[in-house]
Amino acid sequence: MLELFHYPFMQRAFFGGVFLSALLAYLGVFVVMRRMAFFSDGIAHASLAGVAAGVLLSFNPLVTALIASLIFAALIFFLEKKTNLSSDTAIGLIFTSGMALGVLLISLKSGYQPELIGFLFGNILTIQHSDLIIMVALSVAIGGFLIAMRRQITLLALDREMAHLSGINADLFQLLMHMILAVSVVLGIKMLGIILVSALLIIPVSIAKLTSRSFRALVFWSIVVSEIIVLAGLLVSYFLDLPAGATIVLTGTAVFFIVFIFKRAFQT
Amino acid sequence: MDQKIIKVEHLSVHYNGRTILNDLNFSIKKGEIVAVVGPNGSGKTTLIHAILGLIPYRGNILVDQEPVQKVFGRIGYVPQRFVFDRTVPMTVGEFLKLAFKKINQRQLRRVLLEVDMIAHEEASIGTLSGGQLQRVLIARALLSNPTLLLLDEAMSEIDIAGEKSFYDIIKHLNRIHQTTVVMVSHEINMVYKFADQIICLNHDIICYGKPKDAITKEVLEKLYGQEVKFQEHQH
């Protein structure tokens, strides 16, 4: 089995998967606490505009998608703060507008665009060397920030008023969390695709919640479970010649139900 | 000379064209227990939020002779309702440690002992009853050794027996630590028993003073309408 890691594309997939699954799992804890799943889904879909712009301009679509996601995240934050729109309405507005812009930009380029299909459904095995550098560098930078600011971020996720009274600039941290989540989601698109990327934010923490009794355990098991899901899914997809993104997600779903059934059986 | 811990001058709050607080002026002495009473929508929570700097307002508010932003560390606050995702596994100890950067186990156990929650240090905050959660929130407020404790209808989710012990804890903290307590309450009977001063609020200040002097039939009618019956306490 180890021989498959001799392939450079498999090494890139492995390293990219290890870093990104840890980052998305850690962020997923706060996404679930703050009920921001729709935000991450919205940003993922809206980033199609950035991907399409990259394809149209013959530039790395990952970079243009990252830039687009930052703009959209800031726009959602602005709409939430400065208008009377509810959060899900603001996200819905940007979600659909970003996708519409993406479709419009794609229509300007004639012919089949394989890169676009790759971004829609993801393919961890097609990660390029330049993509890997971006993924690892940003994962380490964001992960470091999240660890350094874990008290402030956890408090903000728990209760905004309390965060403010603890001397935390709640608006600034909220904007930063929007930006960080947007960047992380776009990084995950290369692995799982626009449609499935939210799964890595939601599934690991859902599994960890079934068994954890403390916050520390929740974070630890979310990351461990995420690594297991991604690596197991990657191996299964390789040996059975299945799409990697979909296999990783379904591996996670299977683990969730196995743990759920075991927990129920053990309790009764 | 009595030291003032809160000084409010010409405080007004307007929201969507409505006046919530109208030119309030009052001060609170150090070491007092002050109750703020009034009907729903009278501006009680808005007053607490203004003191905490959570909302924009007109006028001046000084806490310990300084703007509130400079003294956050010396203020404890227990909200009316603490809404959070109860399914998130987080122990009472972990929750309390979030309050400040450096909290050691000794400080943690001290505040949990004070509110009689030491046995629940490892319990998940999502599994606590309303009364237990309010005690944990008081413990959290006490971690900073506050000179001022603000309670915004903190008893709203506690049953009658729990309410009594809650007030006992507040009284104990006031006596032992000389903590000034400002509490929003709708329980006039409890206010009579525990508060040194009372502020009756209905957008304006209707009354201010010692409960037995300030609460009169006319004041209650102004606050709650004609249907409220007045029965004088015999102490």
Image (cartoon, helix red, strand yellow):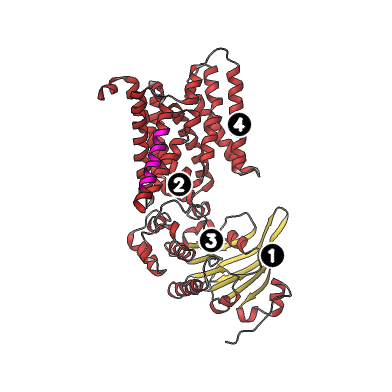
Three-letter residue code for mark 1: His
- Helix, strand or loop at disc 1? loop
Residue receiving disc 2: A153
Q: What separation in Å lies between label 4 and label 2 (alpha carbons)?
A: 29 Å
- Residue A60 vs residue B235: left or right? left
Which image quadrant is residue A16 in?
A: top left
| On screen, residue B183 above or below A230 | below
- Find the magenta span and give its range: A249-262
Q: Is residue A261 magenta?
A: yes
Q: Badge 4 is on which residue?
A: A96
Where is residue B60? Give x, y as percent: 62, 60
Name the subunit of mark 4. A
Question: Dot 4, how many residues are within 10 Å of its Cα: few (below 14), some (14-19), or many (20+)?
Answer: some
Q: Chain of mark 2?
A: A
Identify the chain of the residue marked 1, using the numbered disc in the image.
B
Res. A145 in view: no
- Indicate the position of residue A10 as horizontal and vertical percent values: 33, 23
Please tell me whether residue B98 belongs to the stretch shown in magenta.
no
Q: Residues within 10 Å of mark 2 (few under 14, many from 20)?
A: many
Q: Quadrant of the C terminus of chain B?
A: bottom right
* Marks 3,4: beta carbons within 8 A: no
How far apart marks 3 and 4 lie (CA) works out to 38 Å
Q: Which numbered disc, 4 or 2, marks the residue closer to the eye?
A: 4
- What secondary structure is found at the residue carrying circle 2? helix
